[in-house]
Image (cartoon, grey):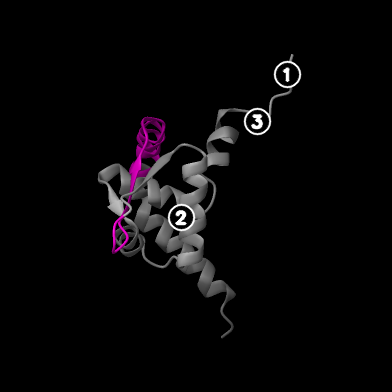
Amino acid sequence: MANNTFNCGLDAALAVIGGKWKPLVLYHLAQDVHRYGELRRAIGGVTDKVLIQQLKELERDEIIARIDFKEIPPKVEYSLTPFGHSLAKALGALCQWGTEHMQTVERISEARTSALTPP
């Protein structure tokens, strides 16, 4: 019997979507195909270096497809693969939970920040 890399299904899923930006990339690509600049503006707060790395990893993991139109000026589009759509669908429940509990999460985060700030 082969050794399993993952301990459970959640472990396998987190190996693919781990990190701050990948779930946001999936969220936006689940809505529509995006060019790089559109995606960066939609996500906000991410550096070019980090977003490019995250996109490469998602493409390597067959979650997204990168289509280079070989045009001048350059035109590249990103979209979800069928495998990526199945993952985005699974993230829907997590998104719903975040929407329902956003105020509570913000309150807890603000309280934690206040506790760390010296008087």
> Which of disc 2 and disc 1 is earlier in sequence?
1
Disc 1 or disc 2, which is closer to the eye?
1
- Badge 2: how crowded within 10 Å, few (<14), some, or many (20+)? some
Which residue is disc 2 drawn over?
21
Q: CA distance from mark 2 to mark 3?
A: 22 Å
Q: How many marks?
A: 3
- Name the quarter where the C terminus is drawn: bottom right
Q: Secondary structure at mark 2?
A: loop
Residue type marked 1? Ala
Of the 4 image quadrants, the one containing the N terminus is top right
Drawn side of residue 8 relative to residue 104, left or right: right
Q: Which class describes the residues within 10 Å of circle 3: few (<14), some (14-19), or many (20+)?
A: few
Q: Secondary structure at mark 3?
A: loop
Image location of residue 71, percent across then percent down: 29, 57
Which range is magenta? 71-96
What's the residue at 32%, 46% (across, down)? 29
Quote the CA–CA distance across marks 3 and 1.
Answer: 12 Å
Q: What secondary structure is marked by label 1?
A: loop
Furthest residue toward bottom: 119
Q: Residue at x 57, y 33 (%)?
A: 12
Residue visible at 37% across and 38% down in the picture: 88
CB atoms of marks 2 and 3 within 8 Å: no
What percent of the width, then of the height, locates residue 104?
40, 56
The x and y percentages for residue 79 are 33, 43
Q: Which residue is mark 1?
A: 2
Which residue type does callout 3 highlight? Phe
Q: Amino acid at mark 2?
A: Trp
Name the foreground residue: 29 vs 8.
Answer: 29
